[in-house]
């Protein structure tokens, strides 16, 4: 039954069924073949269905997976669903469809869509973060963190939307506003669960040396952690006899301190308020700060504000000077000690602050080399002046000496600070994993015994957030009541749920053993498969998701659950797919491309090949319908080529050379993720072949199909069978190119003038006499030796030399 025309609608379903029935893509635990674990970021099954952006990144890794299988690897290429979280909860609130039902529906739809693309996922390992069998282990990890004191509760300010009366994750705050309603977000203090990721900060930086990530991704990780070395200085506060700790990276400027500024949320303020003469003003300022988000407060260009604590002074530990105390919202409560020593002469922010409030400006560092213009603030390092016994030292020397001086007198010492904060792990939402903790009036926070895991999320009809901002689980009256596992008294379950990150920071471990109810995964399987060899994902996940999952892996390593320090050997990222108009695809713009329609109209292989062809893989690219049609025409041509040439017995030398060159190119392009240039090379080859049909025989056609199989798995499978093959094209070995065949035939020609060697040139082996002479005459050395001479004769020995026989010009001579 031969198809004469390429008809993807007829063949794609057929082959998908065939592959599935034969379990083609199932990874085999403990196979003797070398293992290869290839990972894509599992999708969030939203109500909108699959985005063409998913198709792009999944097809890319699918191509790599298919090529690796053909090259003899035991490939693990799994998929699952990251299904807890806000989008589904919000969708449920809007439509009245329960999140659980919505999730099931969405997954069903996503699965149908992914399958229609012919992606070679191992579906037998499918996971779903919202299934109790899965989140049992998410909760188990939390318990281990709790037992190691890495999960703790604290009163901390959270983002709060006063309109929706709801606590927000940082991701939900865009430019200081709630992303859903646009209301200005304020800070509200609430008891939260935190995870102490900061305890791993140094290792998270250090171990980047062990992995093969793109350089920019490594830098993003490092900047996010934001390690800063400096000095902690204790400032004594008069009247109350307490100290305020200050973190500074410029302790060499300490003789230039003119004020001490506290963050408005600094704890010590409560003690100071009764002592200041302007307490009303101060209280008002604190209130105003609460209405601002951290984003607003740290904007660099914004005007500085502050309020003095009148009548209170701190003491500079080096000079014993009395310095005034202030509050200002540019000081962040959670960084360093939540206080800053103000040095207007050497810091821009402090300079602006001092100008505005008429503080003194004391210069204590001068440039080492004299400058023409000496303007303040001078923010670089230099040599100290007006700094008592430290005057004359360089900034570097002074930092060390002053830190030592402080340490010896118990007034401070070396300190390292991180931008990275502990990870806020509580959400006051319904659609997440319950935190497995029981609050007992006698024993406090008690972990749920491991044997009682999972703590199942109760089915609630009403899952709106409560007016007080408590999680909707506070309404699950039955579920809430439990006995304390320690003392048996009546106690209450924790009602906060985990963030979306919780289920996604370890999911790649569960693929190894998704049905294991005894352990997170069998250790032998962990040993065999991990680490992940190649992880591709979105640029937007190269900070948080990557950092969280690396952290959890290190923690599991410390527990002895996994056996290396890093989960991903290699990390790359893809660019997003924009709409045809260059904007983000969005329902509200009406510019969304639905992959279903493309598959229906042109076939999955066209969609796949088009998305690989659209542009450099790591860049954002706008959709082009015209280019989609162009790709479909290319597939039609390839189809015709194969059908026309299938009877040809022999191939021309040129065709063989070209197909081996293509072989090399495709191999290299796939490894470097240069899919777009790979496709162009296929197109060029097909054009060449159509013009030289007589020279395209079996050997060339078969190699072409195998090379193209990872890109267009259905089309190539169909043609392969049409050639009379009985086994699948995807079970063929990846072809090796012959390096001898593709060597570009370059040779060196010697250039002589009157028999004397004057130069050498590199040219094509079968270059013509005319061409060779033209090149030879353009060489500088040759020109030089021919000046004033006239060429009488040119001798060309192919593959060897050119000899110019030349004589002196008479005219010139006679002059
Ligand atoms: C005095 C000083 C003088 C500073 C000078 C700089 C220049 P990084 O590198 O980001 O760690 N700082 C400390 N704690 C702060 C807080 N809670 N909120 C806002 N700013 C804070 O920055 C360290 C510097 O940031 C510290 O060094 C401190 O200002 C400020 F000529 O101290 B410096
Ligand atoms: Zn108890």
Image (cartoon, helix red, strand yellow):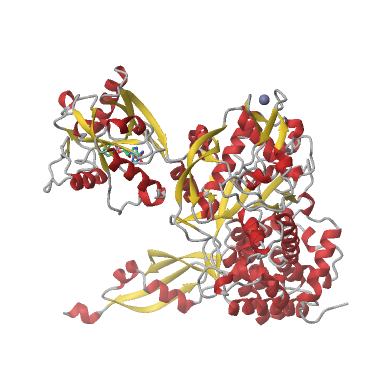
Q: Looking at the rendering, which quadrant does residue 62 occupy?
A: bottom right
Using the image as rendered, state which of residue 795 and residue 492 is in the foreground: 492
Furthest toward the top, the residue is 408
Using the image as rendered, state which of residue 694 and residue 592 is in the foreground: 592
User: Residue 619: horizontal and vertical position, in percent?
Assistant: 51, 63
**Residue 649 relative to residue 354: left or right:** right
Locate the N terminus by quadrant.
Answer: bottom right
Q: Looking at the rendering, which quadrant does residue 346 occupy?
A: top left
Classify 653 as above or below 670. below
Classify 494 as above or below 613. above
Q: Residue at x 76, y 31 (%)?
A: 451
Using the image as rendered, state which of residue 526 and residue 236 is in the foreground: 236
Using the image as rendered, state which of residue 347 and residue 268 is in the foreground: 268
User: Residue 569: horizontal and vertical position, in percent?
Assistant: 60, 44
Q: Residue at x 71, y 49 (%)?
A: 130
Can residue 337 be seen?
yes
Q: Looking at the rendering, which quadrant does residue 54 occupy?
A: bottom right
Can residue 73 be seen?
no
User: Residue 727: horizontal and vertical position, in percent?
Assistant: 85, 62
Classify 282 as above or below 107. above
Locate the C terminus by quadrant.
Answer: bottom left
Report how many numbered discs are placed on residues in the image.
Answer: 0
């Amino acid at each position: 039954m031969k198809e004469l025309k390429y008809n993807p609608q007829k063949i794609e379903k057929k082959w998908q069924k065939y592959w599935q029935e034969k379990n083609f893509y199932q990874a085999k635990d403990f196979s003797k073949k070398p293992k290869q674990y290839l990972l894509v970021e599992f999708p969030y099954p939203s109500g909108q269905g699959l985005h063409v952006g998913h198709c792009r990144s999944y097809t890319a890794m699918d191509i790599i997976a298919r090529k690796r299988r053909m090259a003899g690897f035991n490939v693990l290429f799994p998929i699952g669903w990251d299904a807890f979280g806000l989008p589904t909860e919000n969708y449920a609130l809007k439509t009245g469809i329960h999140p659980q039902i919505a999730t099931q529906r969405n997954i069903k739809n996503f699965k149908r869509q992914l399958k229609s693309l012919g992606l070679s996922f191992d579906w037998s390992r499918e996971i779903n973060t919202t299934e109790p069998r899965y989140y049992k282990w998410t909760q188990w990890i939390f318990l281990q963190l709790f037992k190691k004191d890495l999960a703790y509760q604290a009163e901390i300010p959270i983002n709060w939307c006063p309109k929706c009366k709801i606590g927000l994750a940082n991701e939900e705050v865009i430019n200081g506003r709630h992303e859903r309603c646009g209301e200005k977000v304020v800070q509200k203090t609430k008891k939260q669960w935190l995870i102490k990721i900061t305890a791993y900060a140094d290792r998270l930086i250090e171990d980047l040396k062990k992995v093969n990530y793109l350089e920019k991704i490594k830098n993003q990780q490092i900047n996010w952690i934001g390690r800063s070395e400096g000095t902690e200085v204790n400032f004594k506060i008069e009247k109350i006899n307490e100290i305020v700790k200050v973190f500074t990276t410029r302790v060499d400027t300490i003789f230039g301190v003119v004020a001490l500024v506290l963050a408005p949320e600094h704890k010590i303020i409560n003690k100071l308020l009764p002592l200041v003469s302007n307490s009303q003003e101060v209280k008002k300022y604190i209130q105003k700060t609460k209405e601002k988000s951290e984003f607003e407060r740290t904007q660099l260009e914004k005007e500085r504000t502050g309020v003095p604590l009148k009548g209170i002074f701190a003491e500079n530990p080096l000079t014993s000077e009395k310095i005034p105390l202030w509050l200002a919202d540019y000081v962040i409560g959670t960084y360093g000690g939540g206080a800053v020593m103000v040095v207007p002469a050497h810091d821009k922010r402090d300079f602006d602050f001092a100008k505005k409030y008429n503080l003194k400006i004391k210069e204590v560092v001068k440039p080492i080399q004299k400058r023409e213009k000496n303007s303040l603030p001078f923010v670089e390092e230099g040599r100290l002046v007006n700094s008592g016994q430290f005057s004359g030292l360089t900034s570097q020397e002074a930092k060390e000496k002053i830190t030592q001086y402080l340490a010896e007198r118990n007034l401070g010492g070396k300190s390292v600070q991180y931008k990275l904060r502990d990870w806020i792990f509580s959400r006051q939402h319904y659609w997440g994993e319950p935190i497995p903790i029981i609050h007992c009036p006698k024993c406090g926070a008690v972990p749920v015994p491991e044997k009682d895991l999972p703590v199942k999320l109760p089915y609630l009809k009403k899952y709106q957030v409560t007016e007080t901002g408590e999680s909707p689980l506070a309404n699950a009256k039955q579920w809430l009541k439990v006995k304390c596992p320690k003392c048996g008294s009546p106690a209450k379950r924790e009602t906060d749920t985990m963030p979306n990150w919780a289920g996604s920071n370890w999911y790649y471990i569960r693929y190894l053993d998704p049905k294991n109810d005894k352990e997170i995964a069998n250790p032998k399987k962990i040993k065999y498969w991990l680490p992940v060899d190649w992880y591709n994902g979105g640029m937007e996940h190269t900070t948080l998701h990557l950092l969280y999952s690396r952290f959890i892996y290190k923690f599991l390593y410390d527990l002895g659950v996994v056996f290396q320090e890093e989960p991903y050997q290699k990390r790359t990222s893809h660019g997003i797919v924009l709409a045809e108009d260059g904007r983000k695809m969005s329902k509200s713009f009406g510019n969304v491309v639905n992959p279903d329609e493309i598959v229906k109209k042109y076939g999955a292989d066209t969609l796949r090949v088009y998305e690989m062809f659209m542009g450099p893989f790591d860049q954002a690219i706008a959709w082009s319908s015209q280019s989609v049609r162009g790709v479909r025409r290319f597939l039609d041509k390839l189809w015709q080529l194969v059908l026309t040439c299938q009877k040809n017995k022999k191939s021309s030398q040129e065709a063989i050379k070209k197909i081996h060159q293509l072989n090399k190119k495709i191999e290299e392009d796939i490894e470097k993720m240069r899919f777009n240039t790979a496709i162009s090379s296929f197109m060029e080859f097909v054009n060449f072949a159509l013009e030289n049909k007589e020279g395209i025989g079996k050997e060339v056609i078969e190699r072409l199909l195998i090379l193209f199989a990872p890109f267009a798995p259905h089309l190539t499978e169909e043609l392969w069978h049409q050639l009379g093959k009985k086994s699948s094209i995807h079970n063929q070995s990846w072809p090796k190119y012959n390096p001898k065949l593709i060597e570009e035939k370059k040779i060196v020609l010697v250039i002589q003038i009157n028999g004397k060697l004057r130069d050498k040139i590199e040219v094509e082996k079968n270059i013509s006499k005319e061409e060779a002479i033209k090149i030879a005459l353009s060489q500088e050395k040759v020109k030089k030796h021919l000046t004033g001479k006239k060429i009488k004769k040119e001798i060309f020995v192919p593959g060897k030399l050119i000899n110019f026989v030349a004589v002196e010009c008479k005219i010139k001579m006679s002059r």
